[in-house]
Amino acid sequence: MPDATPETHVIAYRAAEQLLQARDPRGALKLLDPLITAHPENTAARLLRARAFFLAAQLRSAELEFQLVLEREPDNAFAHFALARTLERAGRDGEATRHFRLAAALDPRPDYLAAARFEEAP
């Protein structure tokens, strides 16, 4: 982004959201990478980039981004849930269960509770 301004960063972020909704995670990543380079502290952009990595099946990158978000916002239920889905997709069910349960404890939404499978607790 040669002439990047706060306004162009907002436009890039919103465009990346739209690309993700349109199931174009690689296009979203192209917009988000320069934005995150300019603003590495922007947790919302990192969360969106983690979602794009997940949809692009770049599971290790998604995991690392979700973990970074959780370091900054340990009470982010969505980030716990999305990290759990990432771990589950990678075949790491034990680790996924922990994050599903944290997500459900932080936000008792029906989908989080169902994924947490509390009735199967040891």
Image (cartoon, rainbow, N blue to C red):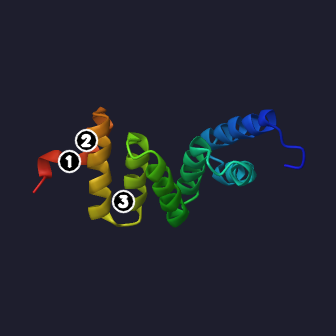
Q: Disc 3 marks which residue?
A: 88
Assign a secondary structure to mark 3.
helix
Type of amino acid at the residue the image marks with label 1? Arg
Locate residue 12, reporting x and y percent.
75, 40
**Residue 65's mark?**
none
Proximity of marks 2 and 1: CB atoms separated by less than 8 Å? yes
Would you place residue 65 above or below residue 18 in this image? below
Q: CA distance from mark 1 to mark 3?
A: 14 Å
Q: Quadrant of the C terminus?
A: bottom left
Q: Position of residue 97 (x, y in %)?
A: 27, 55
The residue that label 1 is drawn on is 117
Compared across the picture, whether 86 is left or right of 57 comes to left
Instruction: Please state which of residues 78 and 41 is positioned toward the viewer in this rendering.
Output: 41
Q: Is residue 110 left or right of residue 117?
A: right
Residue 111 picture location, percent across and down = 32, 38
| Residue at point 68%, 51% (across, down) | 36
Question: Residue 53 in the image: x percent, y percent?
Answer: 57, 56
Disc 2 crowd, CA 10 A, few/some/many (<14, 14-19, 20+): some
Amino acid tagged 3? Glu
Give the quarter of the image for residue 21. top right
> Sequence-wise, which precedes: disc 3 or disc 2?
3
Can you identify the residue that label 2 sits on?
114
